[in-house]
Amino acid sequence: MIRFLFLIKNKLLKNGLVVLLSLVAVSLHSLSAVAQSAELLILYPEVRPPFSKVFDAISSGVEEGFNGGTSSEAVSKKYSVDKLLNRNKPDVVLALGKRSLTGIEKVDSKAPIVLGAVSNQQKNYPGISMVPDPKIILDKLVLLSPSVKKIHVVKKSQGSDLQLEGANKYLASIGKELIIHQGNDIRQAASIYGQLIDGATEGDAVWILQDGSYVNSAILSLLLDAAWSKNLVVFSSNPIHVKHGALFAVYPDNKSMGISLGRLANKVLSGSVEPGMETLKDTLLAVNERTSNHLGISLSKEVKENVSLLLPAR
Amino acid sequence: MNNKYLFILLILLGCSNTFAYEDSAEDDLMALYGGEEFISIATGVEQPLHKAPAVVSVLTAKEIEQIGATDIDEILETVPGLHVARDAAGYNPVYTFRGIGAQYNPQVLMLINGIPLTNLFQGDRNLVWGGMPVQAIKKIEVIRGPGSALYGADAFAGVINIVTMEADGEESFDAGVRYGTHNTKDYWVTGGGSVGELKYFGTLESHKTDGFDERITSDQQSVLDFFTGTSASLAPSSVNLERKNIDARLELAYKNLKLRAGAQIRDDAGDGAGSAQALAEDNTFASDRLNIDLTYENKEFTENLAVKLQTSYLQTSQEVNGDLVLFPEGTVILDPVFGPIGPFPDGLIGTPEVKERHTRFNFSSFYTGIDRHEVGMGAGYYHGDLYEVKETKNFGINPTTGLPMAPGDSIVDVTDTPFVFLTEGKRENSYVFLQDVWQFANDWELTAGVRYDHYSDFGDTVNPRLALVWSTTRNLTTKLLYGEAFRAPSFVQQRAINNPLLQGNSELDPEELKSYELAFDYRPVHDLVFNMNMFYYKWEDIIQFVPVGVGAAEAQNNGEQTGHGLEFEVTWQALSDLELTSNFSWQKSEDKNLDADAANSPEKQLYMAANWQPAELWNIHVQANWVMDRNRAAGAGDFRSDVDNYALVDLTIRRKSLWGHLDVALIVKNLFDEDAREPSQAGGVGARVPIDDDLPLSGQQILAEIRYHY
């Protein structure tokens, strides 16, 4: 009941604010008609906590970044996306998560669509992927372990090469080398990791990609054991690997990503965006303190300012 | 073996990809974060465990819910090396760590949000404890072993820090009801949110029960009946464990300031198996405990300096509803000097009441400006005041006449006379501490700390600690720990008067403890964690009531105990939806004065639990707890056969998000209705044991719970 009252209060406050802003806008004749009435509908999958917290944080960022009113609808079995769109009649739709995407693809939405909180690349809609931008990850590597020269990465054969090509160019520009190993299946990848570990020397780094680079728990254990004994740097795009002993990983800064999605929706409304998803640039950094101590990495003030989550030593 | 072949072998052996999940709306997030645990941490639902140069267990709200715990004692019992025994009076918990236990349990420090609950009167949490519900609890941190170098007095055998839900600004609302056996009715409501920059969170909980009605067959009155030829004892009869509790907590947070207030109201709290181990009709207690604290904490006070300033106030009372009948109607007591006195037609009545207030100021700071060092320092002041002692009674000296009262005389008030049971008084304590965490090599860290305490009544004490932590391999961490601790004498030990068997002694020194621990944390694969530790301790200057003449005993630093043992824990995420946990504890402690095994604490404990999520919104938790090998103190006159071992099995089935916002649960405690008992106190050398067949615990208990959350 209290929550319900809060929602009503917030709604009233929000609506009151919109009315006030609209009045100011009318009196100044300075805002466009689109901006005055722009309504964004956030579609998010109905999930339990803690998953729901991810969408809550994104939505709160969207409210901050979007120049207009926002409303949210949970996509569940109860209502079709069509019904949700008819009920809200938005000017732009932000579909968060795979379920919202699947739902909106089935209907003929008159409003333009922005996509967020999905990890696969969708070419039909503008949006921000949950896949972190490789340059951001590599910048963190340089920050934490500037002496690394060689970075090994195992890529799945069917994966996109565009990101790795970009990473390769970027690393070359700062005097570092990206060595790409290609695996066709997990068996072949395991063999590559074995050779890679045998050949690696102190200060080399291994990068585990967002798609897992074929790393399962057994391979990760052996990789991290070898890294410990040979002082290799293992970093990942998957934060759970940090808990197990990888030096660092990046993960989404959901609120900031929401702000970026809100701003992207502004651009979509003004017609200045092409379809296609951007990589994630709003990220946070998780570092394993035990591993950084082992590698002799001093967590300087600059490093600490960048670290959002310092997974403690045991 | 060549790495290449080892890799392939592992894959062929079917090491599954733990990061693959079945298709659901949560797929992308699980793949992205690698698991629900990290999503909880990344979204602030859970905090990552902090490293600690100690043997620590952290019990989270999630685990409390899974286990179906309705009181902190049920979750604390799952901690290795910790057993919750019972005292006859009110069935108050006796938190027994590693073989260190005593009737009033002052050797354990319980904190709420880092602030002690310790009462001056008995050194415990309150004689009218009445349990503590769990809805306001975010987590409980349990340190086994001493912690006086950080926490000061009474962080002796162990420290239990209860951390309540924080005002994080998130809008939340949760309400629940739980009904069950023994006419148990629980209601609660919690809610949080923010107004501008002010964040708030509040909890209100109500608990009412008739208590279980297991029976005891003899009591202290049975002993008197045997010697005086009376038949006044109410035994066999059931123990008296009814209670009505109200618990309220509120937290307000504004920038770096936090204001917390709490109330624990206890009423109609039954006296268990009697205040003097004698059953009586209708004895009930009450207690009001109110606390408020204001904290300023700035983790970035300057570039490398974190500071915390805190002041707190705690007011407590221990009260009796009506008269407290120590021995029932018709009792004839045996005076060691004058022989049998009685019969007392209304029973022997002595109604003690105590009120206290505690004020604290603390400052602590941590400086990280020196490479590879984290230097901590702090200081504080405590003022405790046992400001009101009241007593009415129908025996002893009548202060009006100056003559002994005769059986059948009416009750007189001896408050503020020399004939009351305890003198009022104050205690002041000031302290400073210094600590350095020094990472002196890549895989080595040394924590060295020392705390100096000055007490207005018993003087000075210095307690150091050393902790060496070695990251031995990627999978193994080794800790070597040394610590010293002290336990402040309680006011009853210093100030009790007019009871020849409980004479206080103002010259008492604190009890002291030295402890050595070697601990290992081993994680051979991702989903498997082993923890093991070995310990040795020496407990000296134990305060005991020592005979000082015919029928008289005085508190003295008299006892000595040593102990050693090990604790072993394993946690295994066997499947993505099945977690298995188990722990085993073994300790051997020796009472050096009696040259015998220490009594009453279990020498072995085994705990096993499985938590299974058969479907997305279902959770089934089953646990079994074995309590074994509790000795009697034959040297102290207890010749009963050892206490029977017991194993209790509990089951909790929970279905979440029914119709969107409802959680329902069925909780069954002591599923197989096992006859479980905790040891009763012996009568002393040459005396008969009052409660011969020990203190029975509850039989099977079934509770149904409905919770609404938004």
Image (cartoon, coloured by chain):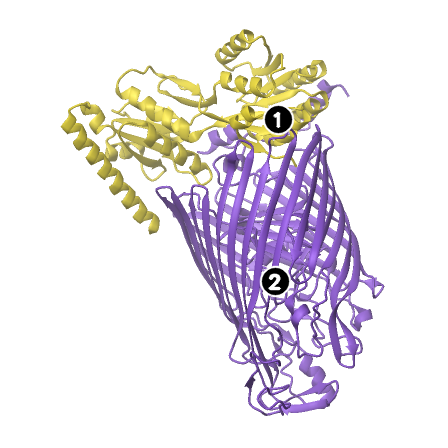
Picture coordinates of residue B531, whole percent (x, y): 70, 42
B289 or B329, nearer to the observer: B289
Q: Do the numbered discs 2 and 1 sit on residues whose CB atoms are within 8 Å?
A: no
Residue B32 horizontal/vertical position (percent)? 50, 28
Q: Is residue B173 visible?
A: no
* Mark number, residue A246: 1
Q: Where residue B535 appears, x then y in whole percent?
A: 76, 49
What is the quadrant of residue A12 in the picture? Answer: top left
Query: Could you confirm whether marks 2 and 1 are on the same chain?
Result: no
Colour of the chain lettered A:
yellow
- The answer to which image quadrant residue B526 occupies is top right
Q: Residues within 10 Å of mark 1 (few under 14, many from 20)?
A: many
Q: Is residue A180 above or below residue B443?
A: above
Q: Secondary structure at mark 1?
A: loop
The residue labelled by disc 2 is B427
- Colour for chain B in the figure: purple
- Please tell me whether residue B75 is drawn above or below residue A308 in the rendered image: below
Q: In the current view of this chain or complex, which residue is farthest to the right?
A: B595
Work out how far the residue at label 2 is from the one at label 1, CA to CA, in angstroms: 52 Å
Q: In front: B325, or A305?
A: A305
Q: Position of residue A65 (x, y in %)?
A: 33, 27
Q: Secondary structure at mark 2?
A: strand
- Pinpoint the chain carrying mark 2: B
Crowd around label 2: few <14 · some 14–19 · many ≥20 (10 Å) = some
| Image quadrant containing the C terminus of chain A | top right
Decide: is B231 above or below B276: below
State the residue at coordinates (53%, 72%): B319
Tag 2: amino acid: Arg
Res B91 quadrant in image: bottom right
